[in-house]
Image: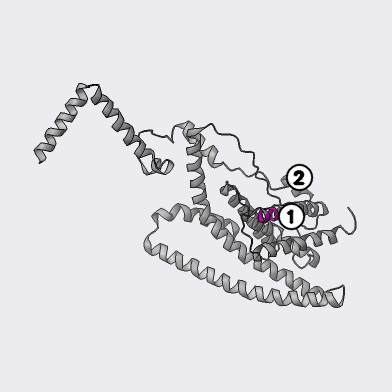
Amino acid sequence: MSDDQPENLSSSFDKILDIQQQLKNCNISSNEPEFQEKVKDAIGELEQLTKNINSLELFSLNESIEELSTNNLKFLLIPALLADFTMKIHQSDRVKVLEKAEVYYYDFLSRLKSYQLCSIDLEMKKDNHNLETNANKNRTEIDSLIQSANDRKSKIDRYMKTKTLEKEIEKLKVMLKGQQKKTLNVDDEIERDFYLKLIDLWKEKTLDELDSIQQELPMARMHAAMGKLSSTQDRPSKPSKSTFNPMIITKNDLQKQVYGAGYPSIPTVSIEEFVKQKMDEGSLQTNSKSNSLYDWAMNPLKKNQEEEEEIVRKEKLIEKDDPEELDRLRKQDEWKDGKA
């Protein structure tokens, strides 16, 4: 690896940060090919950047934020940027997009916590979300109102802090650009303050994004399960070719041996595997004659089709002078006459 490699990494990172700002402020629709191409290119660059940083061992498990050089501070943002670009991906499997971004965001917060830049209990945050999801059915109206008020206050506080940070970052950016025009060197203290505030800004953004992901995921999983059930009734399922392979910045050789080039394998069961498993067990069954809301959601025209088929069947029985059908119709007419 060449001596100027860290400088090249820094330039690559700055370029990606510029792309992130361009996509944030551009007028191109996010589903346009041009937009999606830039997103995929940025993700590829960040993944390569992660591999290069791992090979250089720029981070250590035992160092404090004061020991981390100013030039390397910016690289703490890589997981957050990967999450941000991942959330911009347009693909049919929304669940995988959300889950992958969630992993990146939690890794970013975990990295900040290891440098005492974040005081949030990450395990408690995850557990609270799971408990909240399971307790929603039993929550009273008063509980819901209290929770909504607390959430609203947190979002307002976060919004106010975000706006303050954005103003401070913009001032520092102007100062840095002014110094760069006068001399090739910039004040280390100003540059360090800039990146620390930028990290703090992304921390607030991450908390907002995690809340949004945790609200969207249940609906996305339900939609995926319903779509999978519908498709399996029409044609055999094909194994998915997409992979779940997020990248992580390791802190030493031991971590590399444990984690490899990316994140450790996450023991998750896909929606498709879960549904198939339950159907094989017999605990999830479909009834062709059912007219439940679930069946209607799977096939809105099913009820009308069944009614039309029943009418045709009865007409055929009448044409054949079927005694049971004629007797049923006669009794129906007598009942109507009696009601009249």
Q: Residues within 10 Å of mark 2 (few under 14, many from 20)?
A: few
* Residue 6, image x, y percentages: 84, 59
- Residue 37 in the magenta stretch? The answer is yes
Label 1 element class: helix
Main SS type for the magenta part? helix
* Residue 65, image x, y percentages: 74, 66
Amino acid carrying mark 1 in the image:
Leu
> Marks 1 and 2, Cα distance to the nearest angstrom?
21 Å
Would residue 328 appear left or right of 121 to someone viewing this image? left
Would residue 295 appear left or right of 93 to someone viewing this image? left
Please state the extent of the stretch shown in magenta in the rendering.
Answer: 34-39
Label 2 element class: helix
* Residue 326, image x, y percentages: 19, 26
The answer to which image quadrant residue 270 occupies is top right
The answer to which image quadrant residue 325 occupies is top left
Viewer-closest of 189 and 201: 201
Amino acid carrying mark 2 in the image:
Gln
Q: Residue at x 29, y 32 (%)?
A: 311
Q: Which residue is mark 1?
A: 46
* Numbered tag placed on residue 257 in the rendering: 2
